[in-house]
Image: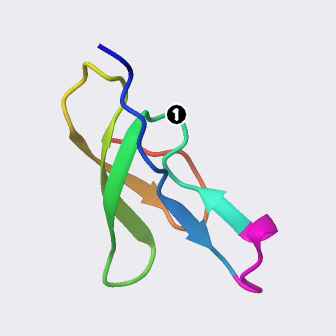
């Protein structure tokens, strides 16, 4: 079975150029369905850490940081 290849969850910050893209799902093989918290501080999304892992809900600080389960 081949590894799952998903699109990353990213955050694009002003001035909205390709060099301002931040990958929020770094280290995951698949991620998607991002939702921003009501206060804009957190982003939640579904992700997989490996092709055989179960889908989990991850949370990442919108300002910086790595995703956490």
Q: Quadrant of residue 32?
A: bottom left
Depicted 17 relative to depicted 43: above or below: below
**Residue 35 position within the rendered picture, expressed as x and y whole percent measured from the top left:** 31, 71
Give the residue at the far left of this rendering: 54
Q: Foreground residue, 69 or 23?
A: 23
Q: Quadrant of residue 6?
A: top left
x 57%, y 68%: residue: 11
Q: Is residue 38 above or below residue 48?
A: below
Give the quarter of the figure containing the N terminus.
Answer: top left
Q: Residue at x 22, y 40 (%)?
A: 56
Q: What is the span of residues highlighted in magenta in the rendered image?
A: 14-20
Question: Image check: 57 left or right of 6?
Answer: left
Q: Is residue 18 rendered magenta in the image?
A: yes
Which residue is under mark 1? 27
| Residue that appears at 48% across and 47% down | 25
User: At 55% from the left edge and 42% from the top edge, which residue is drawn?
Assistant: 26
Give the farthest residue toward the top. 1
Label 1, secondary structure: give it: loop
* Residue 11 belongs to magenta span: no
In the displayed structure, 56 sits above or below 24; it is: above
Relative side of 48 to 61, left or right: left
Query: For residue 55, which quarter of the picture?
Result: top left
Q: Is residue 43 above or below residue 15?
A: above
């Amino acid at each position: 079975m081949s590894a799952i290849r998903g699109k990353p969850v990213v955050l694009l910050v002003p001035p909205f150029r390709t060099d301002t893209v931040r990958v929020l799902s770094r280290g995951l093989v698949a991620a998607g369905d991002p939702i921003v918290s009501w206060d804009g501080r957190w982003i939640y999304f579904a992700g997989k850490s490996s092709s055989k892992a179960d889908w989990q809900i991850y949370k990442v600080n919108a300002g910086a940081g790595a995703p956490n389960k």
